Structure formats: structure tokens, C-alpha cells
Amino acid sequence: RQKRHRGALGLRDTPRRDAAAMADSDSDYASDDESTIDESEFTCENPDVVTKYKIAADCANAAMKEVRAAIAVGAKVVDLCALGDAAIERETAKYYNKKDKDGNKVEKGIAFPTCVSIDNCVCHNSPDASDAKTIEDGASVKIDLGAHVDGYVATTATTVVVGGKPVTGAQADVMKAAELASEIVIRKLRPGASTGEIGGVIEGVAKDFGVNVVEGVMTHNMKRFIIDGNKVILNKSTPEMKADPEEIELYEVYALDIVMSSGEGKPKQRDERETKVYKRAIEKNYQLKMQGSRAVFSEISKRFPTMPFTARALEEKRVNFGLVECCNHGLLHAYPVLYEKDGAAVAHVKSTFLVLKKGNDRITTFEPQEVQSDKSLSDNALVELIATELKPKPKPKKKK
């Protein structure tokens, strides 16, 4: 359905998959008897599933808060990434430590490794331990991370400017546009709504603020152990990248992903060697020739069978060589580090929400930094929409 363009290298440049695709793969999570599966057991129709999503969200929010608090002039980027990952592991370790009814340990931990991308670097920057880059005064810092509990994922991303001075100009415009677009879209994605209308709404907000929607950014639905599901909301359609409209359904879960830029909105990879975030391509098998590569792939399959990971987390020797061979044979999906043109202002926000009967429940939030933009929305209907409660408060019961 969806056209892919390797040149665009979207923020989620991975094939669309669903539960059926996983069942046909070599995943440990596939079932031997699909006919016995009650799908609702693994959706937000099940209160236990909602609880696990919310615990994962609490862990992701706590990690994000810790990383934000550590951002300061002179802080090393890799240290911030490692801090976020450690926080996710620590927070998720507090829950579900007893084995399940089948005697299995509940899997939990990092669903998306902490990435810290500076200024015109758009996304996916999670460097090796030897990287010396530090945060400078006035830098805009984009943080992206995710946690999971029993395969139920919560991701979040935000943008902050360092230094304490008022955020103005193009950086204020992209940050405010991203914030408002997210607030509008989350209110529109209710059961029965079409995903085909959303890209135009996002582009309308960008136009009001004189900025561009970054191409290749997609909002995916998420399922158990699937961080990028088969429903896609494309923020900006291009001749090379299109997505068929689909209908939002009750009990779905989405990672609402918005990226705005004062540049052209066409980020590019500068150096393949900067790529350090990967994900196992569960639909692909290949017998690697080199022993070192087989050892690396074996570690990935055991420790990161479905979720993205950073090369820094691997313990095997000759990691980089093994990762290259795995990618060459399609065993891994790479998340490239992408850049806008030099000097461009970029903002990235992401939140996870559950589509529930009484309203959309935003379980991770990006807590926007205050900015001073001299621009505003031109559509009063959208202004009024943002003013509405995301999840209406229950009406008080009448006393008898």
C-alpha cells in the first residue's frame, strides 16, 4: 500500500507489519494456533493491557524527566543517552517481577533507545561511548525514547532549548507549530475518523507558522511487541511517499509523531557511520558467513528480538563489523541519523495515546517549553478544538 523512498529515509523507515505478519515470521511471539487467539485480549479492551501501557508510559515519562533535568551546557550527548536508557531499565524493573501464569518472565525495558539530536540534527542520534560531542549554550535538543512492559509500548519525544533565554524566532515557530499540530491531531483521531485528512491539517498549521512539515515522518499504530504497526498516518504526502487512508478504531494505540522545520523539511543522511540504532527484521532470515557477525546477530536475537536497540548496548566484540554484515543481508532495519540544512530550526514532539470510549487518553506527554512566537493559528475552529478537554471529565452523579 505504501510507497517507500529510500532517499527520504523517514523517521520510521521500516516495513509495515501486523500481527499476521509476525505469526508468519520466525518471531518467538508467533502462535502455533492462531484460531485460538482472542485479539481483544491484547488490546485496550482488556483493562490489564491498559494498565501495562500506562506503567510503560510512567517509566518513559520518568526517564524523559531525568534526561531533561540533566541537559546543561557542557553535558555530553552520549551521557544523556546512557542516562535515559538506564532510567528506563531501572523504572521498568520495578514492575511485574513475578513469572506469569505460564511460568515465563514478563519482558520489559527499552522500547526505543534514548536519542539526543542537536540543532539541525533531526533524529536517531545515539552515539558510541567514545563520542565527545557536548551541549552548547542556546542549542535546541530533541529527546526521543520509549519503554515497554510485556511488549506494550509507550514512546515520547520533546524539544528543549538550553540556556534559559527566551525562545524566539524560527525555533519558537517550529516548537509552537509542532505543539499545536499535536494537540489538534490527537483530538481528531477518534473512532471513525479517516487518517487521510490528518496530513492536510498538519500542513495547515505549518503554513500558519511559516515552517515546513518534515517529510517521511509517520504516526504508527502500536500493538504488543510491535512499535510500528500496519496503520500509518503520513504527516506529509509526496509523489514518492503516499499512504492509503484508513479508519481509526476503538481500542487502538498510536505514537503521534510530529516534526517541524524552518528548512525545506527534507532531511538527509550525512554519514552512514553515524547510524547506531537498529531493529531486528523479524521477517528475514540469512545464514551469515562470518563467525563474528553470527555472534553479534545471536546477541541481538536473544536480547532485542523485536524492539529497536543501540549499538552501544551490545556486548559482543567487532560489533560494527557484525552490524554492517547484518544490514547488508537485510537482517536489521537501520534508523539513520538525519539532518536538515545547516542553520535550520527543528522541533520534534511525540506522545502515545489510547483510543478509548470516553476519549483519547494521552499517556505520555512532551511537556512543551514556553516559547515566544509572533505567529498563531488562522483557523478559529482549530483554536476552539484545542480548547476542548481531550478526555471529558465525568459528569457528577445526581444525588438521590
Image (tube, rainbow, N blue to C red):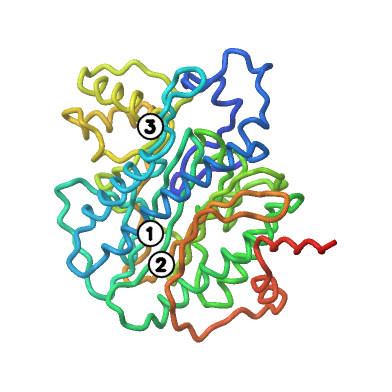
Instruction: Determine the secondary structure under disc 3.
Output: strand
For marks 1 and 2, the one nearer the N-term is: 1
Q: CA distance from mark 1 to mark 3?
A: 21 Å
User: Percent position (x, y) of residue 244?
Assistant: 67, 46
> Pointer 1 and pointer 2: residues touching (CB < 8 Å)?
yes
Instruction: Determine the secondary structure under disc 1.
Output: strand
User: Percent position (x, y) of residue 22?
Assistant: 54, 25
Disc 1: which residue? 122
Amino acid type for the residue under numbered disc 3:
Leu
Instruction: Determine the secondary structure under disc 2.
Output: strand
Number of other residues with Cα within 10 Å of mark 1, as a class: few under 14, some 14 to 19, many 20 or more: many
Q: CA distance from mark 1 to mark 2?
A: 7 Å
For marks 1 and 3, the one nearer the N-term is: 1
> Which residue is at the front of the view, 122 or 356?
356
Furthest toward the right, the residue is: 400
Q: CA distance from mark 3 to mark 2?
A: 28 Å
Amino acid type for the residue under numbered disc 1:
Val
Number of other residues with Cα within 10 Å of mark 2, as a class: few under 14, some 14 to 19, many 20 or more: many
Which numbered circle lies on residue 346? 2
Q: In the rendered image of this protein, does residue 123 appear above or below residue 69?
A: above
Q: Who's the residue at 33% across and 52% down the image? A: 115
User: Percent position (x, y) of residue 216?
Assistant: 50, 53
Disc 3: which residue? 332
Amino acid type for the residue under numbered disc 2:
Val
Q: In the rendered image of this protein, does residue 265 appear above or below residue 291?
A: below
